[in-house]
């Protein structure tokens, strides 16, 4: 049995649904996932910064047909910098480019997004590649968007190779900006075809260390989906069972 309980906000958006804050007394720390750093979210985080790691999801598609109600990438970055400005440490901020669409256009957008945050000194990124669930396929079709995999669900080996090539380009950009290679970290979970990202759960030994907890307790038993590599002490803090107000076309919830 896991020694710690680490909360996470994957069933919803922590910037819109602040109910996670009422549950913090029952966990040893939390990974808060959001596309929208609202003033209310910032105030909640400010009350006990040491207990949080924040994942800011920015795909580069905010304000487009794909993410119609998500703030633009520039607005997301500006809101994040306000959080840094009140003292939240960058080392406990993870930029999630999640998902990536592995087409030429999609890879360019992902690279631009990664480089935008690198220019601000952010060095930890989590990535995934889009899954074309049947209901996502239907949304793309209704919106007149091209299917990245034709009739398929998963990316091809060649498309995953293209994602790796994009990550190598991002690593080169980091170095050219004066960053140290050892300081840069790309992570992924349940993406075994990627070679340029560290396979690990969104709650890992690094996260326990950042929260000041004993890393010897870490495991990767994956309490959720197959191939999940997260710490078994992971516990969901939100209870949304439908699409959140952002209404992203790639959302795994049906409606």
Image: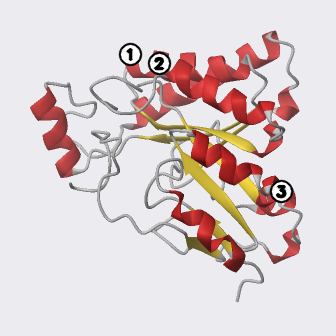
Mark 3, other Cα within 10 Å: few <14 / some 14–19 / many ≥20: some
In-image side of 157 versus 25 (left or right): left
**Is 25 drawn above or below residue 143 in the view shown?**
below
Image quarter in which the C terminus is found:
bottom left
**Is 190 drawn above or below residue 72 in the view shown?**
below
Tell me whether circle 3 and circle 1 mark residues in contact (CB < 8 Å): no
Query: Where does the image place residue 38, in percent across and percent down from the top left?
Result: 55, 40
- Helix, strand or loop at label 1? It is helix
| Residue bearing mark 2 | 109
- Helix, strand or loop at label 2? It is helix
Mark 3, mark 1: which one is toward the viewer?
A: 3
In-image side of 177 versus 143 (left or right): right
| Residue bearing mark 3 | 50
Disc 3 versus disc 1: distance between alpha carbons?
38 Å
Query: Where does the image place residue 175, in percent across and percent down from the top left?
Result: 81, 16
Mark 1, other Cα within 10 Å: few <14 / some 14–19 / many ≥20: few
């Amino acid at each position: 049995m896991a020694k710690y309980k680490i909360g996470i906000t994957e069933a919803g958006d922590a910037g819109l649904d602040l109910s996670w804050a009422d549950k913090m007394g029952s966990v040893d720390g939390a990974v808060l996932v959001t596309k929208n750093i609202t003033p209310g979210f910032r105030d909640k985080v400010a009350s006990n910064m040491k207990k949080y790691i924040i994942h800011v999801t920015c795909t580069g598609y905010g304000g487009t047909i794909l993410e119609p109600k998500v703030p633009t990438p520039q607005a997301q970055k500006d809101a994040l910098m306000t959080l840094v400005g009140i003292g939240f440490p960058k080392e406990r901020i993870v930029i999630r480019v999640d998902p990536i669409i592995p087409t030429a256009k999609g890879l360019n957008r992902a690279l631009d997004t990664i480089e935008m945050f690198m220019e601000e000194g952010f060095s930890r990124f989590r990535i995934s590649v889009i899954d074309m669930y049947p209901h996502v396929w239907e949304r793309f079709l209704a919106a007149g968007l091209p299917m990245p995999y034709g009739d398929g669900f998963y990316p091809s080996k060649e498309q995953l190779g293209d994602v790796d090539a994009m990550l190598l380009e991002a690593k080169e950009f980091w170095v050219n900006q004066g960053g140290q290679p050892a300081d840069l970290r790309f992570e992924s979970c349940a993406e075994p075809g990627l070679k340029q990202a560290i396979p690990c759960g969104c709650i890992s030994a690094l996260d326990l260390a950042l929260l000041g907890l004993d890393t010897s307790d870490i495991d990767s038993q994956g309490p959720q989906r197959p191939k999940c590599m997260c710490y078994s002490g992971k516990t969901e803090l939100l209870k949304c069972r439908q699409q959140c107000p952002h209404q992203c076309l790639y959302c795994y919830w049906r409606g």
